[in-house]
Amino acid sequence: MQNDLKKIETFLSKHHVMSLATSDGKNLSACNLFYVFDPERLSFVVASSDDTVHIKNISKDPQVAGTVVLETKSVGKIEGVQFRGEFYFLENDELKKRYFKNFPYALAMNPKLWQIKVNYFKLTDNTLGFGKKIIWQNSSL
């Protein structure tokens, strides 16, 4: 299980843009966000403003799903992570510092930072064999 999480963490550390899906209970929305992943807290940190559709949606339903993918046409190199989790306003100063260290230009926009606490990962990694999938789910759920 820990080795599976390490593979997921390694993949996520090589990327910085996620696709995120949210819902207000009636309508779906998708967006792309820059992220920093914190393996200790199994959380993404993202920036966004209150006037976006996805933030309005999470005020009604904090459950989200998303993906991070390596864009390639080579089948043998396909890698990607699907995830589910809960979206919260970020209060952790250490994670805020980590986000702005990775994206210092974001400081100029003075964005709100948010945390996505992940409870499910599915890594597809064809470099380990065609269609190889690694699934991790929070055992306390």
Image (cartoon, rainbow, N blue to C red):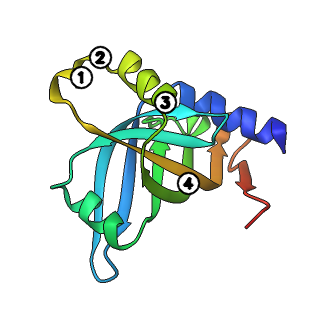
User: Residue 95, which numbered label?
Assistant: 3
Compute the Cα span from label 3 to label 4.
Answer: 20 Å
In the image, residue 97 above or below residue 21: above
Q: In the rendered image, which quarter is residue 3 located in?
A: top right
Callout 2 touching callout 4 (CB < 8 Å) = no
Q: Position of 95 compared to 26: left or right?
A: right
Q: In the rendered image, which quarter is residue 119 located in?
A: bottom right
Q: Is residue 67 visible?
A: yes
User: Residue 107, which numbered label?
Assistant: 1
Which tag is nearer the camera, tag 1 or tag 4? 1
The quarter of the picture where the C terminus appears is: bottom right
Residue 13: image x %, image y %?
55, 26
Which tag is nearer the camera, tag 3 or tag 2? 3
Mark 1, secondary structure of its residue: helix
Q: In the rendered image, which quarter is residue 126 located in?
A: top right
Residue 85: image x %, image y %?
54, 58
Q: Which residue is mark 4?
A: 83
Residue 14: image x %, image y %?
52, 24
Q: Residue at x 65, y 41 (%)?
A: 125
Sequence order check, earlier mark of 3 and 2: 3
Callout 1 touching callout 3 (CB < 8 Å) = no
Between residues 77 and 24, which one lies in front from this camera angle? 24
Sequence order check, earlier mark of 1 and 4: 4
Q: Residue at x 26, y 44 (%)?
A: 48
Amino acid under disc 4: Phe
Q: Position of 101 compared to 116: left or right?
A: left
In the image, residue 69 above or below residue 109: below
Mark 3, secondary structure of its residue: helix
User: Residue 104, which numbered label?
Assistant: 2
Sequence order check, earlier mark of 1 and 3: 3
